[in-house]
Amino acid sequence: DTGVSQDPRHKITKRGQNVTFRCDPISEHNRLYWYRQTLGQGPEFLTYFQNEAQLEKSRLLSDRFSAERPKGSFSTLEIQRTEQGDSAMYLCASSLMEGPGVSDYGYTFGSGTRLTVV
Amino acid sequence: AQKVTQAQTEISVVEKEDVTLDCVYETRDTTYYLFWYKQPPSGELVFLIRRNSFDEQNEISGRYSWNFQKSTSSFNFTITASQVVDSAVYFCALRTYKYIFGTGTRLKVLA
């Protein structure tokens, strides 16, 4: 296992099109996170899963965004009807949470998917 | 509310100068982690250091050093004898279960 993998690395799409990104976490990790980084900003939290359950969604995640992790392994992030403001780097991360009150381990970021909406 | 402030948007130094990047954080949690990441032009986040909220010992790693002061909620990062390869955007971050990143400081080291 070489870390968190994201596909594709780059995506250029026309405004109004739908796009889907994939994230493969580190295999033993039960938590998976999505972040978005726009130009000149730090990454911002979007949502996270523990196993297949989506536990939190940021207000940044509009109705056009949907994330899934159907089998508790890989995750997809879909953006419908893309807008130019969606252009950003989308980062995925994963970690291992062993139980309540215990810090998670091995929090690792992927290299990201850079989306450009033209 | 949780927040990380990096007041310095951009810093330029001449090679071999020392430079300090400032970071101030806000949280009501008593257990948290603080991080510094480097982001070169290629875009990936490169982990530099992690400190937990109970460990205020300063740390030195080669040319890098970190000063964590809970009394002032600061976690500053110093690069000694800067090099051109240090040029990048540096992010300070606070983490409980999710990361809160600052807006980053762009460091330019000029030859």
Image (cartoon, grey):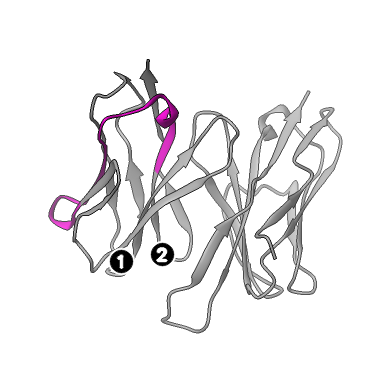
Q: Secondary structure at mark 1?
A: loop
Query: Residue B42 at what x, y percent from top left?
Result: 60, 33
- Residue B96: which disc? 2
Amino acid carrying label 1: it is: Asp
Residue A88's quadrant in the figure?
A: top right
Q: Which residues are magenta?
A: B68-91
Query: Residue A38 at what x, y percent from top left?
Result: 58, 34
Instruction: Give the side of residue A11 with respect to residue A32, left or right.
Output: right
Instruction: Give the side of residue B82 with respect to residue B86, left or right.
Output: left
Q: Residue at x 27, y 65 (%)?
A: B53
Camera sees residue B103: no
A110 in the magenta segment: no
Q: Label 1 lies in what chain?
A: B
Q: Secondary structure at mark 2?
A: loop
Which residue is identified by label 1? B29
Q: Residue at x 41, y 81 (%)?
A: A101
Q: Are marks 1 and 2 in contact (CB under 8 Å)?
A: yes
Instruction: Give the side of residue A71 with respect to residue B34, left or right.
Output: right
The mark that comes first in sequence, 1 or 2, is: 1
Q: Residue furthest bottom?
A: A99
Q: Label 2 lies in what chain?
A: B
Q: Report the quarter where the N terminus of chain B lies.
A: bottom left
Q: Residue at x 41, y 37 (%)?
A: B90
Query: Residue A90 at what x, y percent from top left?
Result: 65, 44
Same-chain check, marks 1 and 2: yes
| Mark in the foreground, 1 or 2 | 2
- Report the front residue among A60 and B84: B84
Instruction: Give the side of residue B24 with respect to residue A84, left or right.
Output: left
